[in-house]
Amino acid sequence: MLAIEKVILHHLVMDYKHPFVTSFGRVEQKDFYIIEVIDQDGYSGFGETEAFETPWYTEETSETNRHVIESFLVPLVLEEEISHPSELAQRFQKVRRNNMAKAAVESAVWDLYAKKQNKPLYQLIGGAKNAIDVGVSIGLQPSVKQLLNVIETKLAKGYTRVKLKIKPGNDVELVRAVRKAFPEIPLMVDANSAYQLSDIKTLQQLDQFNLQMIEQPLANDDFVEHASLQQQLQTPICLDESIHTYSDVQTAIALESCKIINVKMSRVGGIKNVQDIEDYAAKNGIALWCGGMLEAGVGRAHSLAIASLAQFTLPADTAASENYWERDIIQPTVQVKNGQVHLPEKPGIGYEIDREALDYFSVEKVVIEKK
Ligand code: OSB
Ligand code: MG
């Protein structure tokens, strides 16, 4: 039994080394919370809020995460003991949506539980491998020349697949230039919902570039239109923003809206929901892979754990710490060698929290104790 006695919200602000630009906007810093859950025996588990400061990617923001966690989720965690972290998804169901808030707390409890079991989290959740193939997601660049340079640097670091962000006006010719410079690399594109079905002529032109997939071309609730687009495209469609729940996965598979799903632990509300989705995807032969939220080290460690599940067969967007940060908040930091991250074998997320770094980036600390 876990009896959580105290929850600390470490409010941090960290600057990215480089701004990350997508079709929906630009991210320059991460203003977020590390959730620390502490139990009666003094063990700590850690989770990370992954919403951005603006609601362009999903409806959640860092501030809504804090509100929902502080006012609703922490009381639900403190009110009753927990026999297993997989119970929390059910306990949190009375709070509608707010998946990123739920995931931050739920994943912290999984870390705590795994530490008490003295097991690496990836093993506890049934991970099937201890080395993760890693690709890199590259934001929109000011020019094609700069983009080609960035790709060159990333390939030199060993990443096994390159993902390009696209948007209307920065698509066919951009991908053509990249393909010309790098004819053989595993390549994919991500539109972050920037297109409509009426843009089909443009999207069909991407079929000539041998892309692994095109991620989220249409709006986040366009299951029917994605299905129609997929019928008229050779390139597999991968859904990202559309998938928030198990039933979204059922809908996407039933309608044939995609062939591949990008799973983010935070977007689907935690690790238990990832396990359920993985189970369903395996039964239905849908390939999964682990996406990224430009997380700091704690969220990234959780992402890497889910990327170890058997149905996650394509390279993850879990680049190394140094891809984002001058200084990360875990020790060791995430390293990519020969295109892979080797999962740490220590208990829980397997990376230590760098308490000095946590203090360095901290702007506020909210402590909530069991009454
Ligand atoms: O669509 O996967 C996405 C970054 C911010 C918001 C959405 C997305 C992304 C990425 C980067 O593609 C993934 C990463 O490097 O963490
Ligand atoms: Mg995406």
Image: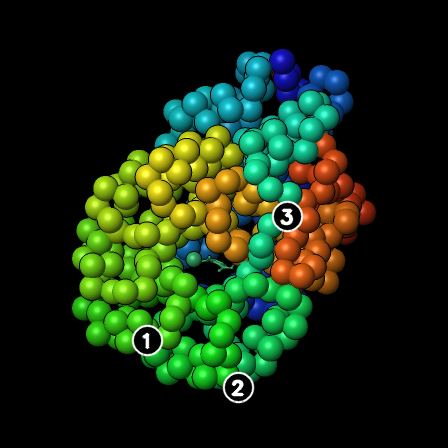
Residue 11 appears in the picture as rendered: no
Task: Name, please, the residue furthest toward the right.
Answer: 356
Up/down of 340 relative to 121, above or below: below
- Label 3 CA crowd tier, 10 Å (few <14, some 14–19, many 20+): some
Residue under numbered circle 1: 208
Q: Please, what is the three-letter code of the amino acid marked with disc 2?
A: Lys
For residue 285, side relative to residue 310 (left or right): left
Look at 46% across and 55% down and name the residue there.
Answer: 54
Q: Please, what is the three-letter code of the amino acid marked with disc 3?
A: Ala
Look at 81% across and 47% down and name the residue there.
Answer: 356
Q: CA distance from mark 2 to mark 1?
A: 22 Å
Q: Position of residue 120 (x, y in %)?
A: 68, 33
For residue 103, side relative to residue 7 (left or right): left
Look at 26% across and 51% down and name the residue there.
Answer: 257
Q: Which mark is residue 145?
A: 2
Residue 93 appears in the picture as rendered: yes
Quadrant where the N terminus is found in the figure: top right
Up/down of 129 relative to 228, above or below: above
Q: Please, what is the three-letter code of the amino acid marked with disc 1?
A: Gln
For residue 344, side relative to residue 250 (left or right): right
Residue under numbered circle 3: 131
